[in-house]
Amino acid sequence: QVQLVEFGGGLVQAGGSLRLSCAASGSIFSIGVMAWYRQAPGKQRELIARITSRGSTNYADSVKGRFTISRDNAKNTVVLQMNSLKPEDTAGYYCNADVDSGSKRLVNYWGQGTQVTVSS
């Protein structure tokens, strides 16, 4: 089994910054794409940033230029640096990863989520 655990959520004023981290542990041979999603109350969960094992990144338009995703393959971690935060960034943030536990088959895992609240 694989566990994803997020750290770093909290309350911040508009214009501020937060850094979210996600650590994967358990039966891991390799990790493919790692990503961050968010879900605000009453809204669907949305993909906001993803990074491949080689470091290629993609961002949702709503966070492009403000958020940066990075990963450390040796430590099985992914980080989301969030700058210039806006009240509309308030949501639960979820880590997601495609993990190969040695069977050469990728299985998708979710973290439990961490709350980010941006006050105006």
Image: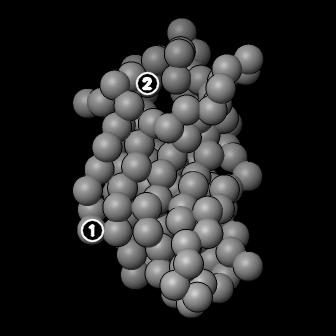
The residues tagged by marks 2 and 1 sit, at their Cα atoms, a distance apart of 27 Å
**Residue at the image position 66 percent from the left and 56 percent from the top:** 110
Residue 81 falls left or right of residue 27: left
Q: How far across and down, in percent of the image, does residue 65 sit?
A: 26, 30
**Residue at the image position 73 percent from the left and 20 percent from the top:** 41
Residue 92 against residue 36 in the figure, above or below: above
Residue 30 falls left or right of residue 56: right
**Residue at the image position 51 percent from the left and 46 percent from the top:** 36
**Residue at the image position 59 percent from the left and 23 percent from the top:** 90
Q: How many marks?
A: 2
Q: How far across and down, in percent of the image, does residue 69 sit?
A: 36, 49
- Quarter of the rendering occupied by the N terminus: bottom right
Q: How far across and down, in percent of the image, does residue 84 sit?
A: 36, 25
Q: Which mark is residue 71?
A: none
Residues 111 and 17: in front is 111
Which of pointers 2 and 1 lies earlier in the amino acid sequence?
Answer: 1
Residue 76 against residue 45 in the figure, above or below: below
Q: How crowded is the residue under tag 2: few (<14 C-alpha within 10 Å), some, or many (20+)?
A: many
> What residue did someone put label 2 on?
85
Give the SS element for disc 1.
Answer: loop
Residue 94 against residue 90 in the figure, above or below: below
Q: Which mark is residue 54?
A: 1
Amino acid identity at mark 2: Leu
Q: How crowded is the residue under tag 1: few (<14 C-alpha within 10 Å), some, or many (20+)?
A: few
- Quarter of the rendering occupied by the C terminus: top right
Q: Is residue 10 visible?
A: no
Residues 76 and 47: in front is 47
Q: Is residue 3 visible?
A: yes
